[in-house]
Image: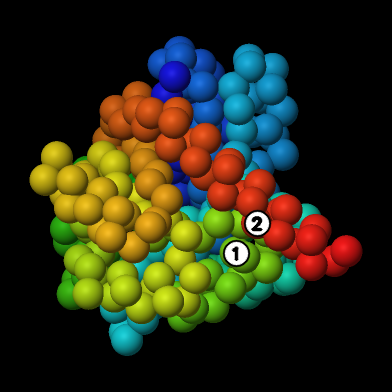
Amino acid sequence: MFADLHLHTSFSDGTYSPEELVGHGHRYRLTAMALTDHDTVEGCERMGVACKAVGIEFIPGTELTAELYSDELHVLGYFLDIHSPKLLAEIVKFQQGRQERIYEMVARLNAHKIPLKAEDVFKLANCRSPGRPHVGRALVKAGFCTSMDEAFERFLKRNRPAYVPKTKISAVQAIDLIHDAGGLAVMAHPGLNRTDELIPQLVDSGLDGIECFHSKHSATDSQRYLNFATKFNLLVTGGSDCHGMSKGKPLIGGVKLPYDYVKKLKARKAAINQQKSSLKS
């Protein structure tokens, strides 16, 4: 029994619909799947229905871009109340920031004599949470680049002409927002962000878990973060970070998290719910 707890759909910068993603999960015989689209929970209802139809356990989630001391990091939220008014209100702000970022990237491309239109990017993205991959795809579709790799290497990577930083909230705010929506807050792919020195402070701020297993984590990375999990009593998660065909090939099936880790997540969630019930009574 295995799970994949880091997945994206076309509701952010993935290329699969929720139904297509679940179809792949079913093919790999996953027991549980979590949807963690960037700055949105819009795809969760459809994904939940699709999972139920094939007998896969579904965990609603999201991935928030955050920072601590100017260091970027990502926070995954699991078991969220996707109808939480506060969560939805904040998500609208994050999405507005993403849309403004598209306009700025396109303006920078135009300044470098690449006549891409923002409208073309938004039409291609067809979602409220557009990102750099959508600009990359638009550049390829319009013939300005031959591949996504070229688009990022020439224009979209950090320190390239059209790079624009993401809108971020503080990591503490991200953790609090996830908790307010009834969720568990997990540090995403720590091996990519290289901010290990921040983990103790994140734990002090309420961090619940850490993503030890990821497509871009080596075996050494995974063991390193398992050690952190043990040291700080953090829950362990893992996932492929599949974006469909957005990153060249679908990654789903490449990381299979043993279901025992999901059981521990559910146990922590149940304990929190029990504690809240006790306080109310």
Q: Is residue 243 visible?
A: no
Residues 75 and 275: in front is 275
Residues 21 and 139: in front is 21
The secondary element bearing badge 2 is classed as helix
**Mark 2 Cα within 10 Å, few/some/many (few <14, many 20+)?**
some
Can you give x and y, in whole percent of width and height, for residue 274 in the image? 73, 53
Residue at 69% x, 17% y: name it. 53
Q: CA distance from mark 2 to mark 1?
A: 13 Å
Residues 135 and 244: in front is 244
Residue at 51% x, 16% y: name it. 26
Can you give x and y, in whole percent of width and height, for residue 269 in the image? 62, 50
Quarter of the C terminus within the rendering: bottom right
Left or right, 50 with respect to 259, comes to right
Can you give x and y, in whole percent of width and height, for residue 90 in the image? 65, 72
Location of residue 180 by image quarter: bottom right
Residue corresponding to mark 1: 178
The secondary element bearing badge 1 is classed as helix
**Above or below: residue 90 compared with residue 170:** above
Residue at 31% x, 31% y: name it. 255
Residue corresponding to mark 2: 272
Q: Earlier in the sequence, mark 2 or mark 1?
A: 1
**Mark 1 Cα within 10 Å, few/some/many (few <14, many 20+)?**
many
